[in-house]
Image: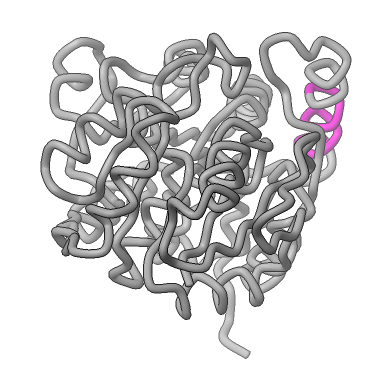
Amino acid sequence: MSQRKELRLGVVASPGGHLTQILTISRAWDEYSAFYVSTSPTVTSSLAKKGPFYIIEESGRGHLFGTIKCFVQCFKIILKERPQVIISGGSGCGSFLCIIGKIFGAKTLWLDSIANVERMSLSGRVTRPFVDLCLVQWPKHADRYSNVEYWGKVI
Amino acid sequence: MIFVTVGSMLPFDRLVKTLDIAVGKRLVDETLFAQIGEADYKPRNLRFVDVLDRETYIRQFKSAKAIISHAGMGTIAMADRYEKPLLVLPRLKRYREHVNDHQVQTAKAFAKEGYFLMAKESNDLVNKIRELQNFTPKKRVTQVDAVINRVEIGRAHV
């Protein structure tokens, strides 16, 4: 068993394209201890291969109860895990974990989904002020905002 | 066999119903097998399941001749990875199929480059399925290593 370095990371993404995209760059943190967060049991087998994980409620427009529950769950996860770095592929659950994590002193990274062609996702725009490194997959998005960088597409 | 998938998050009854009716009218030459999600509409003319576990899903995907789906990035990525001809129908906000119309922009941008075929509306689907038989998708080129390098540098500041 290889020695995992001390840095604690939390990786969060909604199922489907969000999770697929964030996992394309997992080499960037595989040497560290990471826990994973997503919002559907359908991704359980994918996450189980990577590390300990949580399946929580998804937050979203028009789902107030789910959004509140997601927020509370994210808060509890941050309190329990105290990650030093949070890596998010979006969407709603990613916003909460980044924002709460940042308040508790974590460094945060956001990878906006390539599916947002015209502009960054709503969750990305809302979370951007709390993000240390915000990566987008369309060059024009990086021109539009500060602290947003384009280094290519992952998918 | 053409594998029809609605993705992992929401049903997509408009896609499934259109295909079901088309198969019933014998407008589709190929056999379809559909993963329909927790859907209200249950097809009568084609084989379907609600949900597949990941391994079975991947097996069905790999063994299909072509894929028909919504314009979700997970499906698009998988079709590129396994080099499957893909036909997408974007989800639309006005039918409450998604929170906004971003799938339309995604589909247009990618279809224009030749990565897959797109049906703008459900009544385009049958014609596009015929095109799908002879469609060779363009392979996507990504910059994963460049992005990883940037992330690693970012972590050095922790």
Determine if residue A31 is in view.
Answer: no
- Which residue lies most toward the bottom here? A1
- Which residue lies most toward the front here? B25
Instruction: Indicate the quadrant where residue A73 lies.
Output: top right
Instruction: Indicate the quadrant where residue A65 lies.
Output: top right
Residue in front for this viewpoint, A70 or A129: A70
Chief secondary structure of the magenta portion? helix
In x, y percent, where is residue B58? 55, 72
In x, y percent, where is residue B94? 54, 9
Identify the residue shown where x is 40% and y is 28%. Answer: B103
Identify the residue shown where x is 11% and y is 42%. Answer: B113
Q: State the scheme by which the image is colored.
A: one colour
Above or below for B12 versus B104: below
In x, y percent, where is residue A71? 79, 22
- Total tally of numbered discs in the picture: 0
Above or below for B91 versus B44: above
Q: Is residue B135 magenta?
A: no
Above or below for A98 versus B39: above
In x, y percent, where is residue B114? 13, 48
Identify the residue shown where x is 69% and y is 45%. Answer: A38
Horizontal arrangement in the rendering, residue B128 relative to residue A140 (left or right): right
Screen quadrant of the N terminus of chain A: bottom right
Determine if residue B71 is in view.
Answer: yes
Residue in front for this viewpoint, B64 or B131: B131
Identify the residue shown where x is 78% and y is 14%. Answer: A63
Above or below for A81 versus B124: below
Horizontal arrangement in the rendering, residue B107 relative to residue B24 (left or right): left
Horizontal arrangement in the rendering, residue A78 relative to residue B56 (left or right): right
Q: Which region is colored magenta?
A: A71-79
Q: Is residue A73 magenta?
A: yes
Residue in front for this viewpoint, B18 or A2: B18
